[in-house]
């Protein structure tokens, strides 16, 4: 095997963009010779069912972790949003990089935004988080499942299957598809998912060399916000699928976390929403802030909303 540093990556256009970005930064900054190892994951193969029904987001990372474990690769680059809240033992999240636009995007060939949709119109998304927040504003809408990579989802919209779809702005912008964004959701109306728009870099926990090197690349405000967001999810039992949104944003040195939870099966039940603020300085204090938000959600009745798992 070559002495190059190898990045395991999924082969969707977005995953490859992200892996190439990490490769280029590591080469420019540390002079590393980096190669990509493309892989297909279970999550890429299952296109007909909601991920929440077949084992959740871990499906996108398992094969990459196996490559790390077997020494076929050294780093795995992920959309942080797709990384389970607790990594299996032996693996570490060595870096979180600066976020692209964390907002959700409205993509439609006919309607400017959610308010412009006629009664009973059809919106495509398979994200429970997006479904409950769309229905909170427009209970009349018909929501239809929409899976596949970004190009597939856009094609399904263009074929006329939906009046509009909702996608992460980050993915569209990274792929040069920003022109497809008709409008952007206010993060108060459509709170993003924990980690949305950020990159997460995973390594073997015992890889001291890469751990030290990657520590120098962490984008601290994103790192703290995302650890707080992920802690909200973890505290509520993040391995289960639930309609949860958690978004942290910095203002004058203060981190505000907005979180919203919908009922896991009765998707039109009122959302439970909380906001907390703090000034975390490290991973532990960021997590504590997220745990505080989760505690407030529980006080407000989250226990009745969570799936039994
Ligand atoms: N769940 C799939 C996924 N994972 C990351 C992104 C977009 C990029 C990001 O949020 O970092 C997407 C597509 C989407 O939600 O529209």
Image (tube, rainbow, N blue to C red):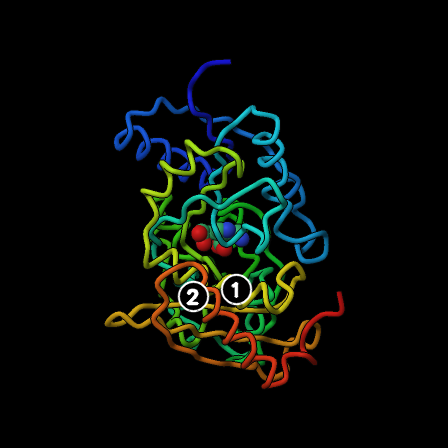
Q: Which mark is residue 231?
A: 1
197 relative to 295, above or below: above
State left or right for residue 180 relative to residue 307: left
Residue occupied by mark 2: 285
How far is the residue under mark 2 from the one under mark 1? 11 Å
Which residue: 52% across, 28% down?
Answer: 38
**Which one is in front, 182 or 128?**
128
Q: Quadrant of residue 272?
A: bottom right
Image position, residue 247 (x, y; %): 43, 67
Residue 36 lies in what quarter of the image? top left
Residue at image location 52% in from the left, 44% down from the top: 92
Q: Residue at 63% across / 40% down in the picture?
A: 62
Residue 150 x %, y %: 49, 47
Q: Mark 2 near mark 1, Cβ–Cβ under 8 Å?
A: no
Disc 1 beta carbon < 8 A from ligand 1? no
Extreme residue toward the right, this view: 308
Task: Find numbered disc 2 in the image and state the secondary structure of the residue it sits on.
Answer: helix
Quadrant housing the C terminus: bottom right
Q: For label 2, count other residues whose C-alpha is less than 10 Å away and answer few (under 14), some (14-19) or many (20+).
A: some
Question: Would residue 284 be found to the left or right of residue 86 on screen?
Answer: left
Under circle 1, the secondary element is helix
Tag nearer the camera, 2 or 1: 2
Q: Nearer the viewer, residue 3 or 187?
A: 3
Name the quadrant containing residue 252. bottom left
| Residue 41, x across and y down, in percent | 62, 37
In the rendered image, residue 159, in percent from the top left (x then y), is placed at 53, 51
Report whether residue 268 is seen.
yes
């Amino acid at each position: 095997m070559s002495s190059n540093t190898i990045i395991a990556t999924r082969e969707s256009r977005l995953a490859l963009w992200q892996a190439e970005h990490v490769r280029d930064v590591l080469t420019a900054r540390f002079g590393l010779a980096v190669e990509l190892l493309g892989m297909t994951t279970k999550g890429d193969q299952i296109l007909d069912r909601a991920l929440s029904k077949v084992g959740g987001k871990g499906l996108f990372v398992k094969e990459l972790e196996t490559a790390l474990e077997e020494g076929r690769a050294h780093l795995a680059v992920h959309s942080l949003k797709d990384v389970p809240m607790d990594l299996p033992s032996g693996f570490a999240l060595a870096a979180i990089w600066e976020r692209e636009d964390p907002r959700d995007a409205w993509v439609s060939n006919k309607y400017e935004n959610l308010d412009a949709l006629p009664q009973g119109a059809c919106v495509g998304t398979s994200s429970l988080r997006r479904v409950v927040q769309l229905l909170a504003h427009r209970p009349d809408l018909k929501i239809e499942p929409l899976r596949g990579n970004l190009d597939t989802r856009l094609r399904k919209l263009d074929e006329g299957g939906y009046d509009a779809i909702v996608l992460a702005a980050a993915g569209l912008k990274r792929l040069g598809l920003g022109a497809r964004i008709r409008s952007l959701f206010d993060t108060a109306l459509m709170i993003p998912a924990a980690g949305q728009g950020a990159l997460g870099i995973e390594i073997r926990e015992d890889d001291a060399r890469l751990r030290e090197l990657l520590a120098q690349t962490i984008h601290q405000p994103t790192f703290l916000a995302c650890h707080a967001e992920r802690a909200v999810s973890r505290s509520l039992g993040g391995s289960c699928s639930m309609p949860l949104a958690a978004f942290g944003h910095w203002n004058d040195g203060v981190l505000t976390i907005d979180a919203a939870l919908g009922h896991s099966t009765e998707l039109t039940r009122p959302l439970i929403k909380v906001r907390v603020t703090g000034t975390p300085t490290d991973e532990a204090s960021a997590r504590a802030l997220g745990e505080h938000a989760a505690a407030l959600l529980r006080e407000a009745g989250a226990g009745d909303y969570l799936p039994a798992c």
